[in-house]
Image (cartoon, grey):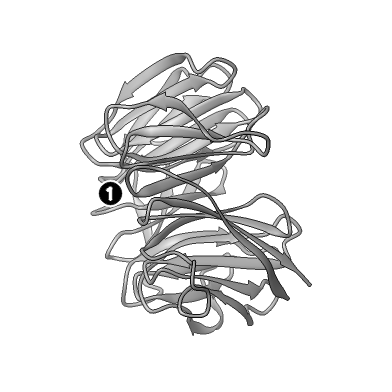
Amino acid sequence: MQLLQHRTLGEHSQPVYALCEGAGPYLFFTGGGDRIAAAWTTEAEPKAFAYTTSSIYSLFADPKSMLLWIGQMNGEVLCLRISDGQILHRYELQKGSIFDLKALDEHRIAGLSRDGFFAQFDRQTGAWLQGIALPVQSARSWHPFSDNEILLAGDPAGLLRCRIDVEEPTAERYSLCEWPLFSMARHPDEGWVFGGKDACIYRFNNRMQEIQPKIEAHNYAIYGLSFSPNRALLASCSRDKTLKIWWAKDLSFQLRLGKPTLKLAHTHSVNALLWLSDQQLISVSDDRTVRSWEFKD
């Protein structure tokens, strides 16, 4: 595999923290410290889709309902109609930043705040369903695990498996490493991969048993992990200003995308990434840029 093309697609006026796949006419959305959610297409310059009251830390565009969800630093969640940008709902959650928004299942959207408040919304209408305070010190990302259970990363005590259908939730803790885990993704073959504050990648099965030794992948914390649509590749991004590409099957290293090899690569922390296709990867950074990376075998 080799890098075919690298382009800077555009910029925000402040660091970019959030990135998600688009819906309808939009390929993807970005958001960051300038409090602007921007919509991107292949045919025109990005446009300001929504203005918010605080920095944007998470985004999710739902192709099922055509709603855009925005999570902010001040603990507020916005629900907008993608067709015209109208705000349908505005929810003030907790004081903690909203780090992760995604679909929980076919009927629910959920958002996680830094202080562990887990909010659920109706996927079709955006209406409030339930909020629950999870027993965590700090939260950064989550993923559905089973019916009414999630995995939660970011807590110093380790990875947490939490029930979300009870009034007083408990958490099963897995101490997989000495440092907090920040990012996670389901492995296409079995189990999970995790990215840690210690800059390592870990692979475990569904029983949280280690499948292979940890990989010293980056120099600083890993903020994002994502498998390509065909599940053949894994991309990671880090505070060390780089992205790296790995074979999904055995997590063997393939490409490093960063300085000094690439003179025009990101100059600050890479905060999020998104595969638009099996050959095209999007990344956003504290350096305010939105970049496209295109590959060939």
* Residue 190 visible to an observer of this rendering: no
Residue depicted at x 73% and y 76%: 1
- Residue under the image location 48 percent in, 79 percent down: 217
Q: Is residue 195 left or right of residue 221?
A: right
> x%, y% of residue 189?
71, 67
SS state under label 1: loop
Q: Residue furthest left?
A: 95
The part of the image, by quadrant, that contains residue 61 is: top right
Name which residue type carries label 1.
Answer: Pro
Where 83 sits versus 151, above or below? above
Q: Which residue is mark 1?
A: 135
Towards the viewer: 29 or 43: 43
Q: Is residue 110 left or right of residue 203?
A: left
> In the shown orientation, is residue 248 left or right of residue 173?
right
Question: Does 243 sit above or below residue 45?
Answer: below
Q: Is residue 183 left or right of 211 when viewed as pictured?
A: left
Number of residues whose C-alpha sits closer than 10 Å to that of mark 1, classed few (under 14), some (14–19) or many (20 or more): some
Horizontal and vertical percent position of residue 274: 58, 52
Q: Position of residue 122 (x, y in %)?
A: 52, 22
- Residue 67 visible in rendering: yes
Residue 256 lies, with reference to residue 6, above or below; the image says below
Quadrant of res 93: top left
Q: Position of residue 191 (x, y in %)?
A: 61, 66
Closer-to-camera residue (265/54): 265
Q: Residue at x 49, y 75 (%)?
A: 201
- Residue at 28% x, 65% y is 157
